[in-house]
Image (cartoon, grey):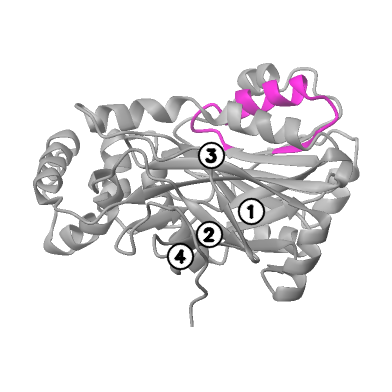
């Protein structure tokens, strides 16, 4: 039976709410925890006209004629790009016996956000009630009538000291073919998402050693649901997601390609600043500019980046000159390129505490 708590939320029982996995960090000298929460509210409504328009754009841009089976996959894949949203909705969360109202109402694109602060005493109560288990807190979204909706958010409460793995998604853990416009668009809208062989096994080994995970991508938030489903089906460890904001406008498909070129560095730098005492392992690929970005971040935050691992792609190899420039001056960071995940160290905790340079090929 659902628990009812009086609330002033504008979220209707018929609304579809997507709340993204997040993290919490200690503040106030360890007396309380801060949890930043983000999500999107989609309203029930007609979307067929926009769906047809988007399909025509895809056919024109990628030069493909979807099969009947691909049409079935296309429908859910574009849903969050074209679902109707409304500005100004207040989102409320139940945390234990308290209701928290997020400070930022939904914008025109349905996105909302806010911060929840919890004391150490409140966390003890949540642990006793079962809402906090193994360092993961469950926060419940409320509907207008005060009942719990079917939507909730998980927040991983991370201590100041530990190991965090920041992982790119496209062509690092997921086959994306970013180098090819046609293959990228087909893979985004018409193909089942496919994970890179062996990456989930490696990440699970690292998670068993206590590593926390942060999945960072230039993909838009509208692709969070199928990305999360791929990670869950592939056995990847739970982690926070950090994607890009994107609104459907003219020339949508061209813009979808352009936004992939930037945005990740700011997110990763924020993680590094939020947890200055944690050691970070950055995993990416050679297809875009992960090597250069990770090198800049390691130089900007000396002592925090324990290792950089770059998956090699034939379409854009990491040749010696490029690598030397990208990783210049990183004498205390373990740097390794790989083609197969089995080439990377199993013992991540040892790597995160080491200060020696390792260069692989």
**Label 2 belongs to which residue?**
197
Magenta stretch, residue numbers: 285-308
Residue 193 visible? The answer is: no
**Label 3 belongs to which residue?**
103
| In front: label 4 or label 3 | 4
Residue 288: in magenta span = yes
Tag 2 and tag 1, C-beta contact below 8 Å: yes
| In front: label 3 or label 1 | 3
- Of callouts 3 and 1, the N-terminal one: 3
Tag 2 and tag 3, C-beta contact below 8 Å: no
Residue farthest to the front, as pictured: 6
Tag 3: Cα neighbours inside 10 Å, few (<14), some, or many (≥20)?
some
**Label 4 belongs to which residue?**
146
Q: Is residue 284 above or below residue 91?
A: above
Residue in view at x 59 percent, y 39 percent: 284
- Separation of disc 2 and disc 1 at Cα? 8 Å
- Of callouts 2 and 1, the N-terminal one: 2
- Separation of disc 4 and disc 2 at Cα? 45 Å
Q: Position of residue 55 (x, y in %)?
A: 14, 45
Residue farthest to the bottom, as pictured: 1
**Label 1 belongs to which residue?**
341
């Amino acid at each position: 039976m659902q628990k009812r708590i009086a609330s002033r939320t504008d979220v209707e029982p018929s609304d579809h709410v997507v709340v993204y996995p997040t993290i919490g960090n200690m503040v106030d000298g360890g007396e309380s925890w801060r949890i930043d929460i983000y999500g999107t509210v989609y309203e029930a409504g007609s979307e067929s006209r926009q769906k047809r328009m988007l399909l025509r754009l895809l056919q024109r841009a990628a030069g493909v004629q979807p099969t009947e089976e691909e049409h079935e996959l296309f429908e859910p894949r574009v849903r969050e790009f074209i679902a109707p949203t409304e500005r100004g909705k207040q989102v409320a969360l139940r945390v234990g016996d308290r209701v928290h109202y997020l400070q930022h109402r939904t914008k025109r694109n349905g996105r909302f956000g806010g911060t929840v602060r919890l004391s150490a005493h409140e966390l003890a109560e949540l642990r006793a009630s079962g809402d906090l288990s193994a360092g993961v807190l469950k926060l419940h979204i409320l509907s207008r009538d005060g009942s719990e909706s079917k939507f909730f958010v998980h927040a991983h409460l991370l201590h100041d000291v530990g190991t965090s793995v920041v992982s790119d998604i496209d062509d690092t853990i997921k086959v994306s073919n970013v180098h090819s416009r046609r293959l990228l668009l087909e893979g985004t809208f018409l193909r089942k998402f496919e994970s890179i062989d062996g990456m989930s096994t490696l990440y699970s080994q690292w998670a068993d050693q206590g590593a926390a995970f942060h999945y960072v991508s230039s993909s838009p938030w509208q692709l969070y649901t199928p990305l999360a489903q791929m990670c869950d089906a592939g056995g990847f460890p739970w982690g926070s997601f950090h994607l890009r904001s994107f609104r459907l406008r003219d020339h949508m498909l061209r813009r979808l390609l352009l936004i992939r070129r930037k945005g990740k560095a700011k997110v990763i730098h924020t993680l590094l600043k939020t947890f200055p005492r944690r050691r970070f392992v950055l995993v990416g690929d050679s297809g875009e500019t992960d090597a250069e970005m990770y090198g800049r971040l390691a130089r900007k935050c000396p002592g925090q980046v324990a290792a950089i691992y770059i998956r090699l792609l034939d379409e854009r190899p990491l040749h010696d000159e490029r690598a030397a420039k990208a990783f210049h001056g990183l004498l205390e960071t373990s740097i390794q390129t790989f083609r197969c995940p089995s080439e990377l160290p199993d013992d991540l905790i040892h790597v995160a505490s080491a200060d020696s340079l390792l260069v692989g090929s």
